Image (cartoon, grey):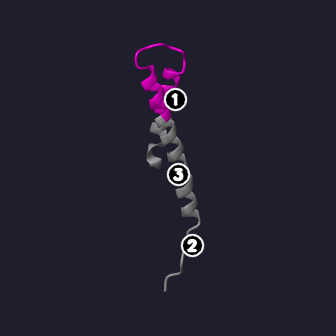
Amino acid sequence: MKNYTFHFLIVTIATALLGFTGLEFPGDKIVRLLCLFAGIGLMISCLDAIIVSRKKRNVKKTPKL
């Protein structure tokens, strides 16, 4: 999931600019909904990157026998 962080960021910014600038067009509600889902995906992706990096830091190496 952390590989898609940049993609979610681009989609979130693009749909936010298109959906929340006050332009009226037939699909504006769909674009706002897409922005919401992309923002949630971005948040999950960022949290996944943080959690995975912390797990990798806390791994203790056992000596080989």
Element class at badge 3 = helix
Q: Which residue is mark 1?
A: 13
Element class at badge 2 = loop
Q: Residues within 10 Å of mark 3 (few under 14, many from 20)?
A: some
Residue bounds of the magenta highlight: 10-36
Please say if 54 is above or below 15.
below
Q: Residues within 10 Å of mark 2 (few under 14, many from 20)?
A: few
Residue at the spot 47% in from the left edge and 48% down from the top edge: 2
49 or 39: nearer the viewer: 39
Please say if 27 is above or below 50.
above
Q: Which residue is mark 2?
A: 60
Residue 16: percent from the left, percent from the top? Answer: 52, 26
Residue at the spot 45% in from the left edge and 37% down from the top edge: 7
Q: Indicate the amino acid at tag 3.
A: Ala
62 or 25: nearer the viewer: 25
28 or 42: nearer the viewer: 28
Q: Residues within 10 Å of mark 1 (few under 14, many from 20)?
A: some
Q: Quadrant of residue 43?
A: top right
Q: Indicate the amino acid at tag 1.
A: Ile
Q: Which residue is mark 3?
A: 49
Q: Indicate the amino acid at tag 2.
A: Lys
Q: CA distance from mark 1 to mark 3?
A: 20 Å
Q: Earlier in the sequence, mark 3 or mark 2?
A: 3
Please say if 25 is above or below 34.
above
Residue at the spot 52% in from the left edge and 57% down from the top edge: 52
Q: CA distance from mark 2 to mark 1?
A: 39 Å
Residue 39: percent from the left, percent from the top? Answer: 51, 36
